[in-house]
Amino acid sequence: MSNGEQKTDHEVRKARIDDVLQRINDEPIQNINPRENSKIFVEKLHAYLHCREQMDKRYNEIDELHELAQFDLEDDSGGLQLQCGDYKTEYLQQSNSGQPVQNISELYNAAQHALPVFKTVIERNLDKIRNSIGDASNSDEAISLLPPLKGKERAIDKAKDDYSKRVPGPAIAYLYDIVRGCVSFSSKNHLVEFLVFLKEDPSVHIVRVKNRFRDPTLTGYRDFNIVFQLDVDGAFKHICEIQVHLQDIKMLDTSLGLHVHYEYFRKYYAGATASLEDRLKDLKLIGVGFDASLMADMLYGCTDAGRLQRLGTLFDDYLGEPQLALKVCAKLLELQSPDSGGTSRSRAVVYMRIAKVLRTQGRPSDAMCFLKTALTLVSPNEPDFFAECYSAIGRVARDQGNLRNAKEMFGTALTINIKDYGKESPNVATSYIDCGRVAMLEGKLDNAKYYFEKALQAYVHVYGEDSAQVAILYMDIGRVAMDQGKLAHAKELFLKALALNTQVYGADNQKVAVAFTEIGRVARQQGQLDYAKEMFEKALAIDVLVYGEDNPAVATSYSEIGRVARDQGQLENAKTVFSKALAINIQVYGESHPNVAISYNNIGRVAKDQGQLEYAKTMFEKALAINGNMYGYSHQNVAASYTEIGRVLQKQGRLEDAKNMFEKALAIDIPVYGEESPAVAITYGDIGRVAREQGQLANARSMFEKSLAITTQVYEGDNQNVATDYDNLGHVARDEGRLAYAQTMFEKSLAIRTRVYGEENPAVAVSYSDIGHVAMDQGHLERANDMFQKALAIRIQTFGESNQNVAASFTDIGRVARDQGRLEYANEMFGKALSINIRVYGEGNPSVALVYSDIGSLARLEGNLVQAEKLLVQALYTLYLVYGKNHWRVAVVSQLLAVVLGDQGRFDEAKQRCASALEVQLEVLGAQHSRIGAAYHCYGLILAKEGNQSGAKEMFDKALAIRLAALGENHYHVADTYEKLGEVLAQMGDWDASESAFSEALNIHQFVLETREKIGKM
C-alpha cells in the first residue's frame, strides 16, 4: 500500500472494532461456562423469587379489592423536576443557615435539629388515631418507631449510587431519609386515616408519595413512603421520610427474612426506582439458570434496549461474566445502529462498557480503540461524559505503560471536573486519585501523596471523616508510606482503613479483606511473617465467602500467602499455593492475561530458589510472552520479565546474556518512568551486580552510585532501597580490598534498616552478616562471629529453625570457626546448615552443594583428603547438573578439588582440572577478574607441591598482577600470594627476591592490623 493509501487512525480503529465485535458474535454461547459466583446468584435468586410470591399472595388475601393500591395521596410539590430535567432547588436539603447543604456534616447538623420536630409531628397525628379508637387497643393498632438519624455510611452510599447525576448538586442534598421513622397499623382503614391526617397537617408539606401497595419494592414489600418538608424553628426547612406499614405485611417480611435478600440485590437495583418491575422481569428470566439455549433465546430474541443495558450491567458489574456482558453489548449495538435510529451517545455508552470489560480481560489495545471512538461520538456539550471517557482512556494508558498519556488524560478529566463540580467534589477526588496512582508508578512519591491528600480533603469535606471513601484514601496514602519505607505510619493508616471498612460494611466484606491484605504486606516487610500470614488468611477467608473459590481476589490472597511461605523457606508449600492462584487466573481469564503472567512469575521465583533454573526461566519466558503480546514490548511488565530472566541467567553464570536482559529492561524503564525512577535504580543495581561478578568493579561502582543518586532523591529520609545501594557499594569496596569503606557502607545500611524495621528484622540480619564478612576479611574473627550470631538470632526468631537464611548464618559461623582452628565446631555448624538446606531444597540444589564444598574444605584442613575429595565431587556433580560445565561457580569448586588432588600427589589430574577451571573462568569472567587471580594462585600451589618451582613462580606472578590490579596493594589476598611467591623464590635460591616478597606480605599484614585497631577504637 502506498503512503497515499495508508489508513487513517479512524479507519484502523473501526477495522479493529469490527473485528472484535465479529469475534464476540462468532463465539458460540454454549462455550461460555458460568462462574461459581453466578451459580450462587441463581440460587439466591430462586429463594428471593419464592419470597416475592409469598408476599404477593399475602397481600391479595389482606386487600382483595386492592383498595390500598388504588388510594391516591397527592403531593404538594407538583413533582421534583423541572421540564428541563433539572431538580427544583427548593427541595434541596438545607443547612442550619437555610442554604443548600454542601457536605455531609452540614446535612447531619441540620437533621439533628429537625429530629425532635419530626417526632412531634408524627406523634401528634398518631394521637388522633389513638384517640378515635380508645386506649384499650392503643399499643397494637398504631405502633410507631422513630429511630435516631440514619447511619452516615449508608447515606453516603445511597447518595453516590442514586443521586450522583442529579443537577444541581451535590448528591447529598437529595438525601431525604436521614430523619426517618415508621408507623404500622393492624387496620388498613386506620392506615388511610393517618395519611389523610398527615396531608391535612398545616406544618407538613408533602414532597413525594410512593404508593408501594401499587408498585411494590424489589422484595415485594408493600407500604406507603411519604417524604415531607418541615419548617424547623423558622430558620430552615428539612425533608424527612415516614414509612406507613400494615402489620400483617410487616410480620411476613420479618418471617421470610426479606431484608437479607434486599441487601444481596440492593446494588443491582441502585438508582433504578423507575424500573424495579423491569429489573424483576430480567431476574425472572435469569432465574431459570445459565442454560445455553435459554440464554441464547434471551439475548438473540431481545429487542428491548433497556433490558439489554440492564443485563450488561448485571453480567459485568455484579456477576463478573465478561463474555456474557460482551454478548449483550454486541446485541445492543445492533439495536442502536444508526439505521435502527440509535443515537451516537447511546453507542458511545455501550463502547465505554465494552472497553471496561476488555480492560478487565487484559485487552488494553482493543479497549483503547473503543474508548477513543466513544470520544468522537459525543457532543462537547456533555463534559461529564468527556471527563469519564478521558479517565477511562487514562486507566488503559496506565495499563499499557504509557504513563505520560495517562497523566495527560487524568489531568484533562481533573480540569473538567473542577470546572463542573468545584474543587471539593467526589468527581474531582476520583481524578486526584487517578493522578496519584500514576505518580506512584513513576516513583514520584511526594507527588502521589499530594494528590491523595487533595482527594482526602475533598472526601472529608463531602462525606465526613468516618466514611468508606476516606478509608480508600487511607489505603492509598498508606501505600505511598510503605514505598517510602515508613512502615509504622503505613500500618497505622491501613488499620484506620480496616476500622472504617469494618464499621461501614461489616466484618465479611471485600474492602475489609483488602485492608487485611495491606496490613499483611507491611508485616511481611517488617519480617513479622506469622502475623502477615494471619492477615492474608483472614483476607482469603473473606474473599472465598464473598466470591467463591474461582475469583481473582482469591487468587491474590493465595499469592500473598505463597510469598510468605517462600520467605519462610517453605518452597514446596509456596509453589502449591502459587499454583492454586495460577489455576484460578487461567480459569477466570484464560491463558493470556497479565494476572496469569504474575502467577508464572511467582512460580518462577520459587523454582529459582530451588535451583530449578531452566524451569524458572521457562516460567519467566511465559510471563514475558503474555506481557509482550498483551502490551507490546515497550511496557514496564515486559521490562520486569527481562529482569527476572536476567537474574536466572546471572545465576547460571551467563553474565553477558544477563547483562543484555538488564539493559533491555533499562531501555524500557527510562522512557516509561524517566531517568530518576526507583525502577531505573533497581535496574542499575542489577547491571552493577553483573559487572561485579565480571570483576568490572569500577563499572559496578558507577552503576551502584547512579542507583544511590536516584533513591536518595526519590525517598525522603530512611528507605530500604537506599540501604540496598549502600550494601552494593559496600560489596564492591570489599572486593577491592577497601575494607574500612566497605564497613562504613554496611553500617550506614544497618542504621537505616534498624530505624525503618526495628532491631529484629531479616533485613537487619543481612547487614549484620555483611559487617561480619568484612570483619572476617580483616582477620577480626571474634567480631565476625558476634555479627553472624546476631544475624542468626534474628533469623531464627523470624523464620524458625528450618529456613535457608538460618542455614546461611550457620555457614558463616562455621567459616569463622574454621579460620579460628575450631574445626569440630565448624563441622557442627556446616552440618546444621546442610541439614536445613536439604530439608528446604532437596539434595540437588546449589545451596546444598556449596555446604558440601565447605565441609570438603574442612576435611582437607583436618588431613582427611579422601573425605574431602568425596564431598567436593558430590558438590561438583550437583553444581554441574544445575549450571552446566561452563559456570564459574562450577569452576571454583573444581579448582578446590584440584588442590585436594595435588595434596594427594595426583598432579596430572590436579593440573588438568585446574587448567580447565581456569579456562572456564577466563571465558566467563574475563582475564582481569579477581577470581582469575585466585585460579592462578591455586594452580601455583599445585605446581609448587609437585616441585615445579619455575612453573609455580609463573602462576604466582600472574596471580599477583591480577590481584594487585583488582584488589589493590593492601588486600590480604595479595599478601597470601606474596607469601607463596616468597616460598617458591626461596626454593629457587633467589633470596633477595624472596625476602622482598615476604616483606611486602608483612607490610600488608601490618596495614590490615593497624586498620583493624583503628576500627576497633571507633
Image: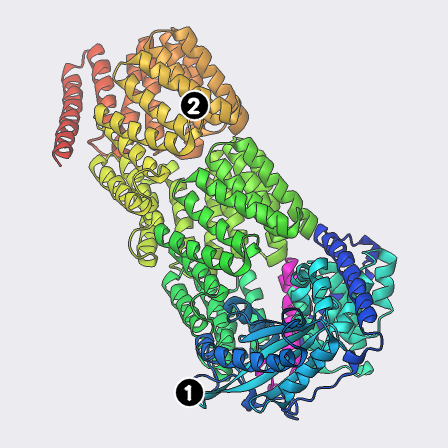
* Quadrant in the picture for residue 379: bottom right
Quarter of the image that includes the N terminus? bottom right
| Residue type beneath disc 1 | Ser
Give left or right: position of 252 versus 807: right
Q: Position of residue 454 (x, y in %)?
A: 41, 71
Q: Position of residue 725 (x, y in %)?
A: 33, 46
How would you rate the neighbour count of disc 2 (Cα within 10 Å): few for under 14, some for 14-19, many for 20 or more? many
| Residue type beneath disc 2 | Leu
> Which residue is under mark 1?
97
Counting residues from the start of the chain, the first of labels 1 and 2 encountered is 1
How would you rate the neighbour count of disc 1 (Cα within 10 Å): few for under 14, some for 14-19, many for 20 or more? few
Position of 447 relative to 720 (above/below): below
Q: What count of labels does the image hold? A: 2
Q: Residue 234: within the magenta?
A: no
- The one nearer the camera, 556 or 51, is 51
Give left or right: position of 533 versus 134: left
Position of 644 relative to 908 (above/below): below
Q: Position of residue 411 (x, y in %)?
A: 48, 74
Dominant secondary structure (helix, strand or loop) of the stretch shown in magenta: helix
> Which residue is under mark 2?
850
Position of 868 relative to 478 (above/below): above
- The one nearer the camera, 39 or 710, is 39
Q: Position of residue 108 (x, y in %)?
A: 46, 75
Give the magenta range.
357-385
